[in-house]
Image (cartoon, rainbow, N blue to C red):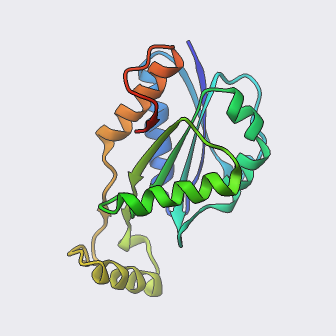
C-alpha cells in the first residue's frame, strides 16, 4: 500500500474538487491519500509519502504562485519520489496547445519536469463570481466563440473519467507496471 500526497492550489474550488477526486481514486485502489490546500498547508512536503501528485489551476496564464513556490522548494524530493502534475485550465477545454504551454512555462519557472502530466479543464462558476468577474468571464468566453454565456448557471468542463484514468495510470507506474508510454497523459 502506497501513501500519496496530493497538494493543490485552487482559486475557485474546481482544482480542490479534482484533488479530492484523485484522493478518492487512490483510496479506492487500496492506498492512502492526503490532499492539502497549499494556501493553508504551507510549502513543506511532509515526510512519509511514497509519491506526490501536485495539482494547480491556471489563472491569467500562470499556475498559482504558492504552488510554484512549493515545487521550487521541494524540487529535489519531487524528482526523487514518483510524482506527477495536474494542470487545470480553461485552455484544456479545446485548446490543448495553450494548456501544454502553461505546463512548459511552469516547468521552466520551477525547474521540475514531471514524467506524468495531466491536463484537465476546470469550470466556469458564474453563480460564484461577483458582478465584474461574471461579466468579464462572459466576455472572454463569448470572444472565444463559446455559447456558454448564461451567467445564471455554472459550466463544469472537467472530464472525470480522464482524471480517474490519469490517477490509475499514475498508480500503475508507482507499482512498476506502466500501462502507458511515458509522457503527457
- The quadrant of the picture occupied by the N terminus is top right
**Residue 182 in the image: above or below residue 36:** above
Nearest the camera: 1 or 97?
97
Visible residue check, residue 89 = no
Q: Number of numbered discs present?
A: 0
Image coordinates of residue 146 in percent, x first then y, are 24, 74
- Residue occupying the point 50% across, 42% down: 19
Image coordinates of residue 133 in percent, x first then y, are 46, 82
- Residue occupying the point 44% across, 14% down: 177
**Residue 58 in the image: above or below residue 48:** below
Residue 80 picture quarter: top right
Image coordinates of residue 52 in percent, x first then y, are 61, 33
- The quadrant of the picture occupied by the C terminus is top left
Image coordinates of residue 124 in percent, x first then y, are 36, 67
Visible residue check, residue 137 = yes
**Residue 3 in the image: above or below residue 137:** above
On screen, residue 112 versus residue 94, left or right, reads right
- Residue occupying the point 24% across, 78% down: 145
- Residue occupying the point 36% across, 34% down: 164
Residue furthest to the left: 147
Nearest the camera: 74 or 153?
74
**Residue 67 in the image: above or below residue 85:** below
Amino acid at each position: 500500500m502506497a501513501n500519496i500526497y496530493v497538494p493543490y492550489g485552487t482559486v475557485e474550488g474546481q482544482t480542490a474538487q479534482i484533488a479530492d477526486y484523485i484522493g478518492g481514486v487512490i483510496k479506492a485502489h487500496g492506498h492512502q491519500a492526503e490532499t492539502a490546500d497549499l494556501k493553508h498547508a504551507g510549502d513543506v512536503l511532509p515526510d512519509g509519502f511514497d509519491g506526490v501528485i501536485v495539482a494547480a489551476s491556471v489563472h491569467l496564464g500562470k499556475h498559482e504562485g504558492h504552488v510554484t513556490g512549493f515545487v521550487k522548494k521541494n524540487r529535489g524530493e519531487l524528482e526523487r519520489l514518483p510524482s506527477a502534475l495536474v494542470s487545470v485550465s480553461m485552455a484544456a477545454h479545446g485548446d490543448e496547445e495553450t494548456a501544454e504551454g502553461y505546463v512548459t512555462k511552469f516547468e521552466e519557472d520551477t525547474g521540475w519536469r514531471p514524467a506524468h502530466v495531466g491536463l484537465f479543464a476546470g469550470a466556469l462558476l458564474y453563480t460564484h463570481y461577483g458582478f465584474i468577474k461574471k461579466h468579464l468571464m462572459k466576455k472572454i468566453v463569448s470572444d472565444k466563440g463559446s455559447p456558454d454565456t448564461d451567467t445564471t448557471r455554472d459550466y463544469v468542463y472537467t472530464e472525470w473519467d480522464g482524471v480517474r484514468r490519469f490517477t490509475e495510470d499514475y498508480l500503475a507506474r508507482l507499482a512498476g507496471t506502466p500501462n502507458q508510454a511515458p509522457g503527457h497523459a
